[in-house]
Amino acid sequence: MYIGKSYNLFEFVIWTKGKIYMLLLLSAIPVILYDVLEIKWIAIPWSVIAMLGTATAFILGFKNNLSYKRSLDAQDVWTSILSNSRAWGLVSRDYLNSEISKDLIYRHIAWVTALRYGMRTLKTWESTNETNNVAYRKLFKIPEQETNLEEELAKYLIASELQAVLKSKNISTHILSLQSKTLKSLYDKQEITVLQFVDMEKSIKDFYNLQGKSEQIKNSPFPGQYNTINNLLVRSFTFLLPYGMLNDFDKLNEGMAGFMKGNMIWLIIPFSFLISWLYFSIVQVGENTENPFEGGANDVPISQISFQLEIELRQMIGEINLPDFSMPQNNIIL
């Protein structure tokens, strides 16, 4: 998540530079054909371009709204995980003795850790390995790529539990099942009342629901039909745009004097490039918003939430040797 006031123009240009050279070339080709080679028939009526541009803007806005909604849904899920985890820490501390409380809290930290690692798993449809994102990712580090999951879980689980969860297909699910098994054992021993047992089991059910919602966002790609029509329209519009500007810019020469007389058509290159660049930039923003867990600069900060939870939950049971709170890297937190 970017926490600065706004991206500056230089950062945005660096992020989108892969498209700049292509768009400059597409803007220059029709001008050269029209003015230098005098192939006049390539000019397209502006009304055609205007209709195509309107349709493109409509579809682009619709798609980006859906992308932003996915990001908001992911933020809501992890905000709920944060709030419910705090409540879990309180009841674990207050219902039970200190040693069992520590086991439940540490196992819960392991669950959050396993879940965030699962959310960072690369999917084929995500854009994290595209050239522009790889170049920009030099500005920050993804915590889940710095250490492996086994090393992290070893901090919170005993050896027997660690080996068992690592063999499971869904580590997060297995950790929650261990929590439920522990609660059942405590209830059988009459160390918690039936109301406490039901209350804590309900919390585990809520965590399962939140985990499922998070996994649904991660494992469900943005509908491919919208991406296809969106890319088709944007590429068609940016390709045809300079051809639609030829006649209008050529007519500007009639009332022009000085060194620009006869050369006004060359202004198509910067103007066409600027408009096309803005359209492609909006497309790129949408593509990097629709997958909010992939490890990009605009992701939901699930690593930060996990680190924050660890500190807060361990403070609840009186621990003082706590990890440092992670700091933003170039105004980016993950």
Image (cartoon, rainbow, N blue to C red):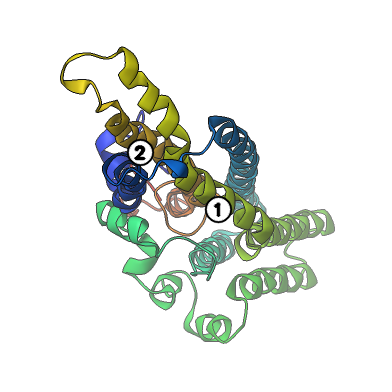
Q: Which residue is mark 1?
A: 231
Instruction: Give percent across and percent down for residue 274.
Output: 36, 34
Q: Amino acid at mark 1?
A: Asn
Q: Which residue is mark 2?
A: 273
Quick one: label 1 or label 2, which is nearer the N terminus? 1
Q: Nearer the viewer, mark 1 or mark 2?
A: 2
Instruction: Give percent across and percent down for residue 305.
Output: 48, 49
Asked if residue 112 lies left or right of residue 80, the reply is left
Depicted 263 relative to depicted 203: above or below = above
- Please rate how many residues cluster around mark 2, counting C-alpha atoms within 10 Å: few if below 14, some from 14 to 19, many from 20: many
Alpha carbon distance from label 1 to label 2: 17 Å
Q: Amino acid at mark 2?
A: Phe
Identity of the residue drawn at 52% across and 43% down: 237
Q: Secondary structure at mark 2?
A: helix
Q: Nearer the viewer, residue 314 or 37?
A: 37
Instruction: Give percent across and percent down for residue 79.
Output: 59, 44
Specify the quadrant of the image occupied by residue 130: bottom left
Q: Nearer the viewer, residue 86 or 114?
A: 114
Q: Is residue 300 visible?
A: no
Q: Secondary structure at mark 1?
A: helix
- Please rate how many residues cluster around mark 1, counting C-alpha atoms within 10 Å: few if below 14, some from 14 to 19, many from 20: some
Q: Nearer the viewer, residue 46 or 329?
A: 46
Quadrant for the N terminus, please. top left
